[in-house]
Amino acid sequence: MIIDDKIMMLPPPPPYLSQSTTNHTLPAPLPILSTSGKPTLASLPAHILLQIIYNTFPLSDSPQHDTIPLLQRRVLFWLSTSLRLTSRQLYTASMHVLRSTYLESYQSLIRPPYTTDPFPLAESLTPGASGPPAYSSPSPSSPSASSPRTSPLKTTQRETPILDLYIALKVRQDVFSDDTSLHIEREEAYRDLFDVAQPRARLEDLVRVYGLREGVVYIPGYTKELYYRSLLRRRDTSESKVSVDETTPSSPSTPKPCKSTPSRWFHSLSLSKKSSAPSLPSTPTPPTPTPYTPLLFSHLTISFSPRKVGLIYNRSRTIAEVSRAATPAARKEETLERLAKALVGEVKLWLQGS
């Protein structure tokens, strides 16, 4: 071992002096992390958690000659049965992966003419929430934040739990089918989901949308400005499409016909006609305040049967019923949107009568 004498003869670092003995102000010491706030896996940012979960999926075959799709289905089964139950943050990240993986398979099983929307693209109903409804936590200013029983993972969309039930069923069926060829899938389980549960949940979501529009349904923290803001956004996008079409140059092979300039007399007639016609409002006018009290949406459920659908209040009182099509052939062409609008109309009449 060679020891350098020059290094050993270097002077020691200067001693720490108190502030009272020095004439100048010393810089503030660097903050030291306390031992009680050690970072954990659940405290990582959401994008890092997602990257960690994505890295758990295998990219090559195993030594036991298991294929990549088989190994990936096992990882999805592990996400559904184990990892998502660990903490709230891991539940959010795991459900993001599971829902995005099985959403296309879920949509392919929807019975026409039924529609589906488990992930609403509209703005959140809770002010201050910036994420999707199933992932966002309520802000301190929101009414739901004051209630300790309200879970920030609870979503207003009734169809999202149906998608979660389908995922829990699908991951088990896939893994059991991979383990043994003697496993037989339960078709009646899928039939119960897509014949009754999915259209009923979708109908409840449509009743919420049309009920908020008509003022017969109420959700805490919801403001009608969000609805009219979405209408204005749709109108702006449609106007932008029209302006783009108008500014697009036409091909030289198809000449435009020459427009004759009208005389002043015809121009005055057109102006008088335009002035006499009622002008359309540029922005949607909010509805007039209703004399009745709207119903809380969390107290409403749907009874869905082949003959009729009903709206139940507080799980005990049927306040509206709508008959369905008489024949099965006509029932296959019956849309949920028509049933939802009819139910909202019946609820409006019931509120006005009461």
Image: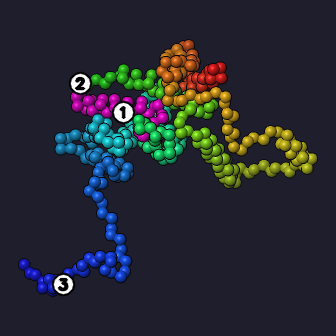
- Residue 10 numbered tag: 3
**In the rendered image, the vertical position of residue 152 relative to residue 207, given as above or below:** below
* Depth order, front residue of 87/60: 87
Residue found 54% across the figure and 13% down from its top: 327
Q: Is residue 180 magenta?
A: yes
Give above or below for 218 relative to 37. Answer: above
Mark 1 crowd level (few <14, some 14–19, many ≥20, 10 Å Cα): many
Three-letter amino acid code at disc 2? Leu
SS class, disc 3: loop
Q: Which mark is residue 167?
A: 1
Place of residue 280 in the rendered image (x, y in percent of width and height, measured from the top left) = 75, 40
Q: Dot 2, crowdedness within 10 Å: few (<14), some or many (≥20)?
A: few
Do the CB atoms of the residues marked 2 and 3 lie less than 8 Å apart? no
Q: Please check the rendered image and state whether residue 118 is part of the magenta-colored stretch, yes or no.
A: no
First in sequence: mark 1 vs mark 3:
3
For badge 3, the amino acid type reads Leu
Residue position marked by numbered label 2 in the rendering: 182
Q: Residue at x 24, y 27 (%)?
A: 181
Which part of the image, by quadrant, shows the N terminus?
A: bottom left
